[in-house]
Image (spheres, rainbow, N blue to C red):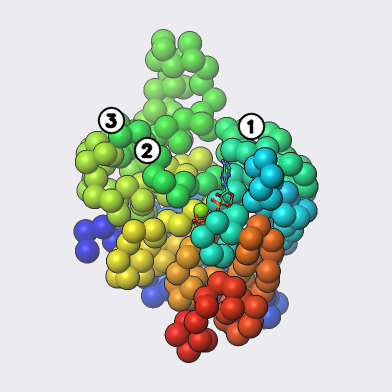
Amino acid sequence: MSDGPTTPPTPPTPSTAETPEEEPVLGANEDELEAAGVDLDVAEAAAPDREIAVEVGENIVEVRNLTVKFGGLLALDDVSFNIRRGEILGLIGPNGAGKTTCFNAMTGVYKPTSGDVLLEGQSIKGQKQHRITRLGLARTFQNIRLFGEMTALENVVVGLDARHRTSVPGALLRLPRHTREEKSSIERGMALLEFVGIADHAADLSRSLPYGSQRRLEIARALATDPKVLCLDEPAAGFNPAEKEDLMDLIRTIRADGYTVLLIEHDMKLVMGVTDRIVVLEFGRKLADDVPQEIRNDPRVIAAYLGEPEDDVA
Ligand SMILES: Nc1ncnc2c1ncn2[C@@H]1O[C@H](COP(=O)(O)OP(=O)(O)OP(=O)(O)O)[C@@H](O)[C@H]1O
Ligand SMILES: [Mg+2]
């Protein structure tokens, strides 16, 4: 399993909204990480070190009445939901339901027609994509977007560069701070590659990587921006079942390391096993928003999304 994470996991049990007080399996916690089999040295090098204004369990993102129109098509229709700091929130729905449009409207790829998106209580609506990334909302794309002619490590360092303070002239003149930052970028970039399980590919051109490693590299690059919230758009698309399970393990590890995750995934079984809560979209509208057990048994969701008996999806 050369593509697998280096520290695969007996994953922590996902918490649910029903037991937040007794069992907040949220946020970085050394015991939890060790129990999950995470190498703490690697985790420390890769871990988020940003100040986050909201406490674990509080709303870090608020999507309010978000609406996106494409001409006459209402791709997203008055959708509201929250993401709590430390959780893995699933975003599911049939093809064309509006999941990617929701990501695009949240992360500045599309300008919402109306509604608002708040990060740590501050509106980020209408801001440019790179600014939103800097503010802490990172995402991967349904269709992989890497710099094919750059190595895996370089692709990650590009993400890290977004956080650098050196001016362009400073970089050109190789002033001491730039040299220091470059060295730490390489160390941190390697730690991130190791964290997602593809350190062996550091020096390979990203276009030559196996497909699964490219998907992992996209995640490493998004993590390099030091996100407060990581949005993954079908990160397991095109994977076989074993690869999908491996990727879900990686997502659990990412959460155990203190990140908040919004996950778009088609595979209902997969999403049930990894998320704390699930938002269901259908025809651009929110159909349901609940813990996985409730979603699994919701007749509207079964009818709309699954179109098959409950036993087949449990
Ligand atoms: N740039 C665009 N211009 C016009 N229509 C668009 C655009 N992007 C998305 N749409 C339409 O908006 C609707 C929602 O699409 P979206 O890609 O958000 O769905 P999705 O839930 O991500 O689907 P999938 O599971 O297939 O990825 C679809 O009808 C789609 O054709
Ligand atoms: Mg999509």
Task: Report the residue that reaches farthest toward the bottom.
Answer: 311
Residue 128: image tag: 1
Tell me if 115 is positioned left or right of 10 in this view: right
Residue at horizontal 39%, vertical 58%? Answer: 237
Label 3, residues with CA under 10 Å away: few <14, some 14-19, many ≥20: few
Residue at horizontal 47%, vertical 65%? Answer: 266
- Indicate the position of residue 17 as horizontal and vertical percent values: 67, 75
Give the answer, above or below, for where 220 lies relative to 182: below
Residue at horizontal 68%, vertical 50%? Answer: 74
Residue 45: image tag: none
Task: Kindly report the distance in space between the C-alpha atoms of the residues bearing marks 2 and 1.
Answer: 20 Å
Tell me if 25 is positioned left or right of 20 in this view: left
Task: Kindly report the distance in space between the C-alpha atoms of the residues bearing marks 3 and 2.
Answer: 9 Å
Residue 149: image tag: 3
Count of numbered circles on the image: 3
* Label 3 residue SS: loop
Give the answer, above or below, for where 128 lies relative to 45: above
Residue type indicated by callout 1: Lys
- Work out whether mark 2 precedes mark 1 in sequence or the reverse, and give the earlier one: 1
Q: Nearer the viewer, residue 55 or 304?
A: 304
Task: Kindly report the distance in space between the C-alpha atoms of the residues bearing marks 1 and 3.
Answer: 26 Å
Q: Which residue is mark 2?
A: 146
- Indicate the position of residue 151 as horizontal and vertical percent values: 28, 35
Residue 212 occupies which quadrant of the picture? Answer: bottom left
**Does residue 309 appear in the picture of this structure?**
yes
- Indicate the position of residue 1 as horizontal and vertical percent values: 22, 64
* Label 1 residue SS: loop
- Work out whether mark 1 precedes mark 3 in sequence or the reverse, and give the earlier one: 1
The CB of the residue at mark 1 lies under 8 Å from ligand 1: no
* Label 2 residue SS: loop
Residue type indicated by callout 2: Leu
- Indicate the position of residue 289 as horizontal and vertical percent values: 68, 70
